[in-house]
Each structure stands twice: as structure tokens, then as C-alpha cells.
Amino acid sequence: MIKVLFIGDIVGRPGRDIVNERLEGIRREHAIDFVIANGENAAAGAGITGVIAKSLLTAGIDALTLGDHVWDQRGWENEIAQIEHVCRPANLPASNPGWDHLVLEKRGFRVAVFTVLGRTYMGLKAECPFLASDRMIERLKGQADAIVVEIHAEATSEKQALGWHLDGRVTAVVGTHTHVPTADARVLPKGTGYISDVGMTGPYQSVLGREIEPVVARFIDGMPRRFEVATEDVRLSGALIEISPAMARAEKIELLTVRK
């Protein structure tokens, strides 16, 4: 079996720290071949920088994906194309810098990964994720043995619909963005592994990774506040996907959660 671990949104320093401290052991314990992680919240909870991207890759991540916070950090648009193994969402305008997919290879097996942004309740200008996925799959023919698609989206319905749309055409469809892990990991009828959200890698004693009190207060009175990254109950959360090399289809997908 080929094993892929897809790690959910890494949030701030707590998320980076648990990756640095635990990932090597997790790879060894589960005999993981490829590690892919969403790093769009790695810099103080919003965006990523070149220094942080390089540190996460050094920690044992093979590929970093990004989401709607891709351009939050000043200057990242000038750095992204200079760092290998990082890709921005594939359905952003073609004029955006950076790669729109990555292909990883180990043990003679090639895994391609790309991200599409959802459009329901999302702010960035993006192409239809369904049509963009169709386009990317066509482009990747002959370039990879397996394809992992990340849908970075708010609406569960949009994520599930993409899973069904791509069933049998890609190896896995994994959801990110909401920071809350879901209990629906399963292999769809035609062999595509699916989960609506792999959760976040960061502090769970929080509201989506942020300190609780200012977020609750904002809901009550609507006044603006600074939402600092929380620090307690740090977990690494992701989806562990087992792939049959002969068929390039998912044999198993399950949520993997590790506490600090």
C-alpha cells in the first residue's frame, strides 16, 4: 500500500510546533510515504511566509497547499514561485503567481495534488471548482499515478458534491478550511476516498484556532477586536489515505488525530 497523510490547516506557531515535534514519529509509526499539508494559516493564523514554508518542508512535509488566505502575508506573491513543493489554488486566475499543482514521487509511484477553492460564502475570485477540477485532471493524464484533490471551501454541500463529481476519476477528495474535523471519511462507490474536512492542526481550546473571549464578544456586540491565535489543546489533524498501487484507487481513508 501507498500511504498519504493530508494534514489540515496549520494554524500559527502552535500548529507549526506540533508538526515539528510529532511528524517524524507519525511518519515512522504509520509507514507514511507522502505528507501533504495545508499551510495557509501558518503565519499567525493568516497566510504563510517563505521562512515558514521552508521550515515546514524541512520538518517532513512533502507538499504545501494554500487556500483563500494565500496572499495575506506581504511579499509572499514574490516568494511563492521560488519555493519548490508549494502550490496555490488551481482555480485562481492564471495570472496569479505560483504553481497550480504538484507531482510527488516515491518508490516509483507518483502522486499529484491540487487545490480548488469553493465559491459558496468565499471571497476570492475563483473559477468554478468543478470545471477547474475537470481541467486539471485532463492536464495530469500521464503525469501521475494518483491524484489527491483538496477542496478548500465553507459549504459542506459544495464539498460533497465535488466528491461525487470526481468519484472514480481521482484517488481522494479531502476538504479543508472550516477547521472542524468531520466524521464522514469513506471510500465512495467508484474508489475515491472522501472526507468533508480533515480539521485543523493547531489549538482546539479555541474558536477555529483563535482565543475564545474576543470571538464570543464580537458575536455579542459586533465590535471589532484582535483575534490572537490560541495556545491550548494543540492537536495535529489529518486524513490518512491508503492507496492500492495497482489500481491507484483509495482502499481506506480515516481521520488521524494526534495530541501534543
Image: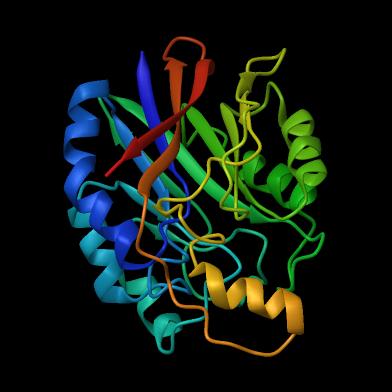
Picture residue at 50% right of the left edge, 68% below the top: 210
Q: Quadrant of residue 133?
A: top right
Count all numbered tags in the image, as a single digit: 0
Q: Position of residue 69 (x, y in %)?
A: 55, 72
Q: Position of residue 26 (x, y in %)?
A: 24, 32
Query: Which one is in front, 31 or 203?
Result: 203
Left or right, residue 147 beside residue 189: left
Image quadrant for the C terminus? top left
Query: Which one is in front, 260 or 3?
Result: 260
Vertical relation: 217 (above or below) 84:
below
Picture residue at 30% right of the left edge, 75% below the top: 50
Q: Position of residue 110 (x, y in %)?
A: 38, 32
Residue 258 visible from this viewpoint? yes
Picture residue at 44% right of the left edge, 38% below the top: 238
How was the colour assigned to the protein in this rendering? Answer: rainbow
Image quadrant for the N terminus? top left
Vertical relation: 88 (above or below) 110:
below
Left or right, residue 113 beside residue 23: right
Q: Position of residue 211 (x, y in %)?
A: 48, 70
Q: Quadrant of residue 30?
A: top left
Q: Quadrant of residue 55?
A: bottom left
Left or right, residue 240 beside residue 168: left
Residue 248 visible from this viewpoint? no
Picture residue at 61% right of the left edge, 77% below the top: 95
